[in-house]
Image (spheres, helix red, strand yellow):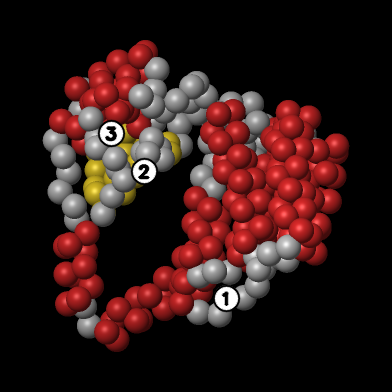
Amino acid sequence: MDVTEDAVRDICTDAVFERGERYREEGRIHGIHRIDTTVTAVVSGSRQYDVRVDLATNGFAPWCDCPYDGPGACKHVVAVLLRCVDDPLADEGDQLDATLDGADADELRAFLRDELATNTDLRDRFLARVGDPTSQSVDEHRTAIDRRFEEANPEYPIVFEPIDFTQWFDLANEYREQGRYASAATVSRALVESLNDNMERVDGAYDHFSRAFSRALDGYVDCVTSAERDADAITDAVAFLDERATSGTPLLAEHFEKAAVELREKLGEQSDE
């Protein structure tokens, strides 16, 4: 996707665009880097906010850890994108590749081994891509996701700012790319359950959490229907969605109902084959 001023305007309100433009002019963007099509940066506001966008994705797939809860992207994302419009970033991917090519294999292996030992997110994605991953249950993934909600505001059971669920979405994508749809469905279901059960704690950044829930639910439905077209798995998934539609957060009931209808249609298609 071309990074143009018009493209940036399309993902935000006029008021947010003006604020982002002002942030860009005030030089509030720091530590900005581009690897392939992904741009990361830190933007100074009332505090330092982390921003990530994908220049190749329609709408730029923006993410920011600020509490903005309005329509479209926030001013921090807009500021970063306008920086890319005004002064296109050099892709540091080639430099990274050159460094990797020149690295000593033993040193690289030792470094990776140390990182995998301490970074569970990286380890899970690494094993999902190149190894035989230890299978985790929905409950095990949920425990880790629920912990993010608890850590967001230790003093009160209220969440005001966005929570970054990237590690679970990335893990699900790794499984999907390897054709491990059942494992991807497990991760997506854990996200769906946790977001549904914790949504009543959210008192800010509603748009962020709603998008995360929709993305997780869509991913779950897609993976269930792709997992070797297993009728039993689809039947179990429909039962789960029906149960959540009646007992889960009322605001999300319609989403569960629509997802259940979609899966029933898939199940009907299998019966006709």
Name the kind of residue labelled 3 in the image.
Val
> Dot 1: few (<14), some (14–19), or many (≥20) neighbours within 10 Å?
some
**How many callouts does the rendering have?**
3
User: Of the residues under marks 1 and 3, which one precedes in the sequence?
Assistant: 3
**Considering the image in quadrants, where does the N terminus appear?**
top left
Instruction: Tell me if residue 235 comes above or below residue 61 in the rendering.
Output: below
Q: CA distance from mark 1 to mark 3?
A: 36 Å
User: Of the residues under marks 1 and 2, which one precedes in the sequence?
Assistant: 2
Which one is nearer the viewer's eye here, 44 or 189? 189
Q: Which residue is mark 1?
A: 133
Name the kind of residue labelled 1 in the image.
Pro
Instruction: Tell me if residue 131 comes above or below residue 220 in the rendering.
Output: below
**Considering the image in quadrants, where does the C terminus appear?**
bottom right
Residue lying at the far top in this picture: please name it. 15
Q: Which residue is mark 2?
A: 57
Residue 172 location (% of width, % of height): 55, 59
Left or right position of 83 against 44: left
Residue at 60% from the left image edge and 34% from the top image edge = 210
Which one is nearer the viewer's eye here, 268 or 235? 268
Q: Which residue is mark 3?
A: 80
Q: Secondary structure at mark 2?
A: loop
> Dot 2: few (<14), some (14–19), or many (≥20) neighbours within 10 Å?
few
Q: CA distance from mark 1 to mark 2?
A: 29 Å
> Dot 3: few (<14), some (14–19), or many (≥20) neighbours within 10 Å?
many
Residue at 19% from the left image edge and 22% from the top image edge = 25
State whether residue 262 appears in this view.
Answer: yes
- Camera-nearest label, 1 or 2: 2
Q: Secondary structure at mark 3?
A: helix
State whether residue 182 appears in this view.
Answer: no
